[in-house]
Amino acid sequence: MRCIERFESTYRKVPSDIAFCPYRVCPIGAHSDHQYGKITGLAIDKGIHIAYAPKTNGVVEMASLQFDKRAQWHVNAVPKEKENDWADYLRGATIALGQKYPLKVGVCGVIEGTLPIGGLSSSAAVIIAFLSALCNVNGIHLSEHEMIMTALRAENDYVGVSCGKLDQSCEVYSKKDHLLYLDTLDDSFELIPVAPTMKPYEIAIFFSGVERTLAGSKFNMRVDECRSAAYALKAYAGMEYGKFNETYLRDVPYEVYLQYRDKLPENWRKRAEHWYTEFFRVQSGADAWRRGDIEEYGRLSFESGKSSIENWETGSPELKTLYEIMTRTEGIYGGRFSGAGFKGCCMALIDPKYAESVEECVTEEYLKVFPELRGKYSVHICHSADGVKL
């Protein structure tokens, strides 16, 4: 791995260990975890590697093969304000871990992502891989739930992204050849195995060639629109409501939404429409996976993507184009854009016997529309994988 080579050339020694966290895909359940919805997801066999070694002076010194700047801070003197660079995720993770456990040992390391950045929860993956390394050198043993919540606090409290726990949960709980079915309200989950009758599948990742930052996008605005819809629905229905930032669509029964949705501003109604319909799609998708009906699961994933475009109103022109091409390509069971929808990639569940033709067809059609992205656009065939080893 290149991160090992860079570490050895920088520090003139071999790394003491390699931390790894997989990326994830969420075929059904997008844009719902921050309102305590349900999700389905899979970890994939690509992710973030960190070659690292302890630093007994307490200094953290991290470099990334994806970015030029090397970042440095002390475990007990992390800048209180984010510096608006890639290492903010790691600074936030250091603070979040240090709030619960005493940190004495720092870490030097080099980060390597095995796929281009965007749409596969690379931010959550790099946080979890970094936390694994920082915990290891300090003799800290986090439970799965602690790891998820510590990584979530890093993004919410320090970086300022109002995300839920979908990404972290998929990257921790997932199991190869199983679908993770998680209720983010109470963290109950089921790992549904591939049924003996299910047709074979692989996971195709189509990178658009477009990279943007999540915190600078309209992601947080979408979350606030959901809260606004929930707050208004509670008021119309005479339900009790408290603080705005503690209001969630999961608090509001579907019947209340149906009764009062026409009173909502259009944007709020659309966000709520996506959330409620996605909630039911996830339940139907989990049932389809149990039956081994990957065609129905794929159809619901396409439906999820359509709602994300029409009701959640995200998706760059590049991602929307990829989605439309996927819907008419033979050999694709289903798929959608992956992540927040402002950058990155689309994922698809495909029939392996069509893998070559799927890649050729999608690539040819996409580059006809966006020829300037030739060389930046790429296709990767992946498989389901276990979550991070703690």
Image (tube, rainbow, N blue to C red):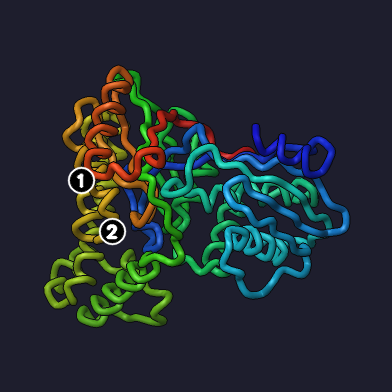
Q: Residue at x 19, y 26 (%)?
A: 330
Percent position of residue 221, x then y: 35, 71
Percent position of residue 276, x then y: 24, 58
Answer yes or no: is residue 23 visible: yes
CB atoms of marks 1 and 2 within 8 Å: no
Q: Residue at x 69, y 56 (%)?
A: 70
Q: Secondary structure at mark 1?
A: helix
* Horizontal side, residue 2 vs residue 42: left or right: right
Q: In the rendered image, which quarter is residue 85 located in?
A: bottom right
Q: Amino acid at mark 2?
A: Thr
Of badges 1 and 2, nearer the viewer stands: 2
Percent position of residue 268, x then y: 23, 71
* Horizontal side, residue 176 vs residue 340: left or right: right
Tag of residue 314: 2
Percent position of residue 107, x then y: 77, 51
Tag of residue 174: none
Q: Amino acid at mark 1?
A: Glu
| Quarter occupied by the N terminus | top right
Front in this rendered view, residue 120 or 385: 120
Residue topped by disc 1? 303
Q: Is residue 108 above or below residue 14?
A: below
